[in-house]
């Protein structure tokens, strides 16, 4: 039988939000299942009058109290940022000729709002946009 494994990732992109959410849900479910096992174990130990009960019951109680707290913290936490990722992306450097906001020779189109709102008829684009 062929064993399936995760596909090999050849990109530095992060996991998708859906995959991150799924892994956090699975982790939460496993931790809460362990909490339920602590509760069942405590009940069985008390019912069976197990030896060293004074050690086992506090351990089970600590597990039942701390595990949900850790489960919620870990379920709400996203994976840590990789060291290679910058905290703030660097701004793109434009070439000197591209820095000008307007270049000469291009037509500037201005929307005439008064013409749109004062007219009861359907206007053509050349009636709305007027060259400067």
Image: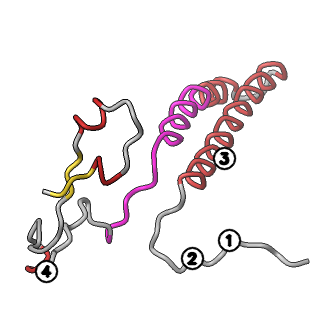
In the image, residue 92 sits, relative to residue 45, either above or below, namely: below
| Vertical position of residue 19 compared to residue 28: above or below | below
Secondary structure beneath dot 3 equals helix
Quarter of the picture holding the N terminus: bottom right
Q: Distance between the residues labelled 3 and 4?
A: 49 Å
Point out the tag, 4 or 2, that comes first from the N-terminus.
Answer: 2
Q: Does the segment drawn in magenta span residue 80?
A: yes
Residue 59's spot in the image, x, y percent?
Answer: 61, 31
The residue wearing badge 4 is: 95
Q: Which residue is drawn at 66% across and 30% down?
A: 56
The answer to whether residue 7 is above or below residue 20 is below
CB atoms of marks 2 and 1 within 8 Å: yes
Label 4 CA crowd tier, 10 Å (few <14, some 14–19, many 20+): few
Magenta residues (range): 62-84
Answer left or right for 131 relative to 51.
left
Residue 9: assigned label: 2
Task: Indicate the quadrant where residue 80 lies.
Answer: bottom left
C-alpha span from label 2 to label 3: 21 Å
> Residue under circle 3?
26
Near-viewer residue (107 or 74): 107
Residue placed most toward the observer, 10 or 6: 10
Q: Residue at x 17, y 61 (%)?
A: 108
Report the residue marked by disc 1.
Answer: 6
Q: Residues within 10 Å of mark 2 (few under 14, many from 20)?
A: few
Real-space Cα separation, disc 4 to disc 1, in angstroms: 43 Å
Characterize the local packing of mark 3: few (<14), some (14-19) or many (20 or more) Cα atoms within 10 angstroms: few
- Give the residue at x 81% y 25%: 44
The residue that appears at 54% across and 58% down in the rendered structure is: 16
Seen from the viewer's position, the closer of residues 90 and 69 is: 90
10 Å crowding of disc 1: few (<14), some (14-19), many (20+): few
């Amino acid at each position: 039988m062929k064993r399936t494994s995760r596909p090999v990732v050849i990109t530095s992109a992060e996991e998708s939000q859906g995959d991150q959410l799924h892994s956090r849900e699975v982790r939460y479910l496993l931790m809460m299942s362990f909490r339920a096992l602590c509760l069942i174990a405590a009940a069985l130990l008390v019912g069976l009058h197990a030896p060293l009960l004074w050690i086992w019951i506090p351990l089970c109680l600590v597990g039942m109290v701390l595990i949900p707290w850790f489960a919620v913290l870990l379920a709400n936490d996203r994976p840590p940022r990789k060291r290679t990722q910058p905290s703030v992306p660097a701004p793109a450097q434009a070439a000197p000729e591209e820095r000008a906001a307007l270049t000469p020779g291009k037509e500037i189109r201005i929307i005439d709002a008064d013409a749109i709102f004062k007219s009861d008829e359907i206007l053509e684009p050349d009636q709305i946009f007027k060259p400067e």
